[in-house]
Amino acid sequence: MQRDVIQSFTFALKARDGGARLGEIVTPRGTIRTPAFMPVGTAATVKAMLPETVRATGADIILANTYHLMLRPGAERIAKLGGLHRFMHWQGPILTDSGGYQVMSLAKLRRLEESGVTFQSHIDGATVELTPERAIEVQCLLGSDIQMVLDECTPFPATRDEAKTSMALSLRWAERSKQAFAAMGAAGQALFGIVQGSVYPDLREESAAALLEIGFDGYAVGGLAVGEGHDMMLDMVAVSTALLPADRPRYLMGVGTPQDMLAAIARGIDMFDCVMPTRSGRHCQAFTWRGRLNLRNACYADDPAPLDAESACPAARYSRAYLHHLVKSGETLGAMLLSWANVQFYQELMGRAREAIASGDFAAFAAEVDRRYAGSTDTAEQ
Amino acid sequence: MQRDVIQSFTFALKARDGGARLGEIVTPRGTIRTPAFMPVGTAATVKAMLPETVRATGADIILANTYHLMLRPGAERIAKLGGLHRFMHWQGPILTDSGGYQVMSLAKLRRLEESGVTFQSHIDGATVELTPERAIEVQCLLGSDIQMVLDECTPFPATRDEAKTSMALSLRWAERSKQAFAAMGAAGQALFGIVQGSVYPDLREESAAALLEIGFDGYAVGGLAVGEGHDMMLDMVAVSTALLPADRPRYLMGVGTPQDMLAAIARGIDMFDCVMPTRSGRHCQAFTWRGRLNLRNACYADDPAPLDAESACPAARYSRAYLHHLVKSGETLGAMLLSWANVQFYQELMGRAREAIASGDFAAFAAEVDRRYAGSTDTAEQ
């Protein structure tokens, strides 16, 4: 007897602790325990990590960037090669962004108009058009499990009028994205809407309400962590999640530090992505249960202590002295081990957050992490 | 009942096939099946590979560079941290060179005299002295299982007189190295002598005979692969091994390509080291059972075939299209996977060579590899 293949995308809320939520997203490619951190695999690779290592850290899902992959190696090429999962040897769920954010931040923007954006590739200068329909088409070619609507990531700062105009455009694109996804999406794939509205609570509310009207499998909070500051970001998260339905997952895009993520979980966020653990790992920075360490610091040259005695990560078993030596010598293994240890720390952080929500101890857990990270210094310790 | 800990270094010759030898070196840290290829871990890391991955490729032993480690992080520091094996998480045997070769090739040489060499570090310009005694002391501080005598790697080309003078100095240093090792070496550690003499058969013979007189646990053939060419190299190997005792392992330093290694095995060599598999891996080159491939080549952009269908390496399961994408994108994972696949290819090559010697098919095996590598092209194939 064959096991039934799950062909739908579902979210189940398992427990609450204050605003924090414990949940489970079930997809045809596997279950995502929430709160979840999605390591970023921009160019079809979580940088300096093997996919099986990413999986072993506890990651249920990764993120890949539509913008990068449509430019190189190309979405049609990946589709011809059997899709992104096969291409990069990652069998679990993949979330793809729409490409909109990178068009704004990386490409030489040519023209933003009602139909979409036209831009020059940062790789070869080619002129490329991205519309809501093309963004969905590309994500379907990749075979993405969770797809994002194309939106305009409102620049910061923006006046209320600018923010409203931008948010309204994103809403019209969201509607078109929904229609395109209805035509092209496969069974079990999901489409998320994105709440915009900059730092204006009423615009955030207007955006959320209109997205609910269209109806999505999940909702992201976008346009944050762009310079508005920690407190304002959290206010906007709270304003947004207050209006979002309890039975859909909520994703805060591009965030963040351990403290930011825990504060957002307390405000009802379920999913995160951020380049921080891998980028920091390539820049000698480690996230540990005792805070952040900069392994270039000379205080580690003779430190026999493991990177993080409290972590279960094999990479965290290496001595600080060895890691210091590797990063001082410019050895690739330094970036490999620190990226690994950081991604695992982020997963362990999510794992402990889930346990804390289940046991009703989330606030105490978040306060403890805050305390450890506030006192984060580079003092060698055994 | 505890298992006895082996406290000695032994070599057993198991079979011969023409000049090729099948053997086993037993050390307190494990057995080395010969012919053996030793991946190079210059700065206490086989570049872009985890130590457990190196082990999983089938490597019984790795090489580390005394010159690099004495300069950074320092031999005394590594000793204080528990030795090189613990430092780099490699529990198997380690062979260290004496540092002499790198002093000549990397450092700004200051003075070569009877006592030793004084040079400037290529890292920070510090003045450092390396004598035969210090080379052994450093290797003992590292805890190396197989240590090499300090020698002068005779420059190429050299006149007969230059080569003789250089070889004679190396012999006096070999004698001093032996005495230093007798005083400092631990039970089960081994010291190898190094045959020099440039391209002059009689000097090679004189060197080998004098080294035998001193007596070593194994013998290396040095000063080759420095520009003398394939045929001359093999002639010098044959001249040297003809005089070396059958009951000691023989090591050809710094060689080489698959074809070079097989030709040297046919002339009685048991051990090799070379940066080629890892360095090539960082430069988009793959060694496969179908020859060498350059993954930057555009012919691989749409090639769904695995890197090497004949290899058992997990890294060789990735498609050529994916590897092409990674190297074109400058992604670290490209170097990681190609280094891994190349080191495993070298180990599989040694494994098949050992099987071929055991079954008396070595000449046919070597001819088959020659044929495959002679026809090595970058034609995409399924």
Image (cartoon, coloured by chain):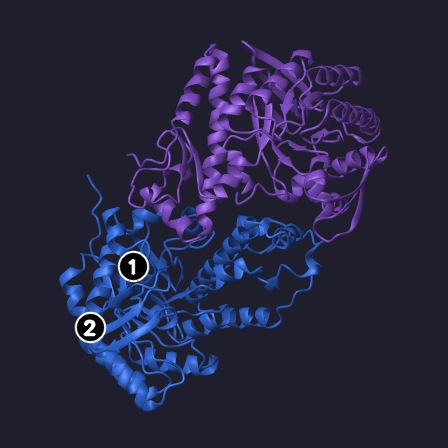
Chain colours: A purple, B blue
Is residue B71 in view from this perspective? Answer: yes
Q: Secondary structure at mark 2?
A: loop
Name the amino acid type tagged 2.
Gly
- Please determine whether, in this image, residue B66 is positioned above or below residue B158: above
Q: Find disc 1 in the rendering and name its residue.
A: B70
Q: Find disc 2 in the rendering and name its residue.
A: B215
- Please determine whether, in this image, residue A37 is positioned above or below residue A247: below
Name the amino acid type tagged 1.
Met
The foreground one among B369 and B204 is: B204
Q: Residue at x 47, y 45 (%)?
A: A335
Could you tell me which chain the residue with mark 1 belongs to? B
Could you tell me which chain the residue with mark 2 belongs to? B
Q: Is residue A235 left or right of residue B103?
A: right
Residue at the farthest front position: A159
> Residue B132: where, in percent of width, then height?
22, 69
> Residue A244: where, in percent of width, then height?
69, 14
Q: Is residue A35 left or right of residue A99?
A: left
Q: Residues within 10 Å of mark 1 (few under 14, many from 20)?
A: many
Q: Estimate the spatial distance between the alpha carbons at disc 1 and disc 2, rounded to whole Å.
A: 27 Å
Task: Work out whether mark 1 precedes mark 2 in sequence or the reverse, and give the earlier one.
Answer: 1
Q: Is residue B243 left or right of residue B377?
A: left
The foreground one among A268 and B232 is: A268
The foreground one among A341 and A364 is: A364
> Residue B343: where, in percent of width, then height?
48, 57
Q: Quadrant of residue B151?
A: bottom left
Q: Residue at x 42, y 74 (%)?
A: B264
Q: Secondary structure at mark 1?
A: helix
The foreground one among B16 and A325 is: A325
Is residue A245 in view from this perspective? Answer: no
Q: Is residue B179 left or right of residue A16?
A: left
